[in-house]
Amino acid sequence: MKVRRSLRALKKVPGSKVVRRRGKLYVINKQNPRIKARQG
């Protein structure tokens, strides 16, 4: 999982979802599970 300042690039990847958990923003992707990121 990468920690990033901006999740904008990862939002555009097909199948990505931006989820808010415990005050942090996460990008998760069921189609391509390698794509994960956290912000905050």
Image (cartoon, rainbow, N blue to C red):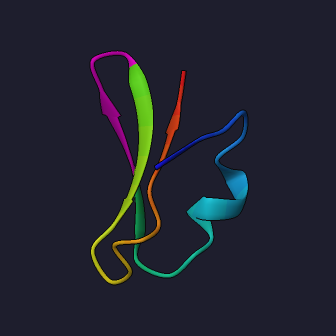
Question: Which quadrant of the view contains residue 32?
Answer: bottom left
Seen from the viewer's position, the closer of residues 29 and 12 is 29
Above or below, 15 against 21 in this view is: below
Judge from the rendering whether residue 35 lies leftward or rightward of residue 28; answer left or right: right
Task: Using residue 7 as the reference point, say whether residue 34 is left or right of it.
Answer: left
Instruction: Please give the name of the residue rendered at 37% of the width and 16% of the height, measured from the top-left corner.
Output: 23
Judged left or right of residue 35, residue 21 is: left
Task: Give the quarter of the figure containing the C terminus.
Answer: top right
Range covered by the magenta-colored residues: 18-23
Residue 22, image x, y percentages: 27, 18
At a point 71% along the width and 61% down the height, the residue shown is: 9
Q: Total number of numbered labels?
A: 0
Residue at the far top in the pictured view: 23
Q: 17 or 29: nearer the eye?
A: 29
Tell me: residue 4, above or below residue 29: above
Quarter assignment of residue 21: top left
Residue appearing at x 63%, y 70% in the figure: 12
Q: Is residue 34 above or below residue 26?
A: below
Q: Position of residue 35 (x, y in %)?
A: 47, 67
Q: Which secondary structure is most common in the magenta stretch?
A: strand
Residue 1: x and y in percent read: 46, 50
Q: Can residue 19 be found in the magenta stretch?
A: yes
Q: Nearer the viewer, residue 1 or 40?
A: 1
Residue 23 to residue 38: above or below: above
- Depth order, front residue of 37/9: 37
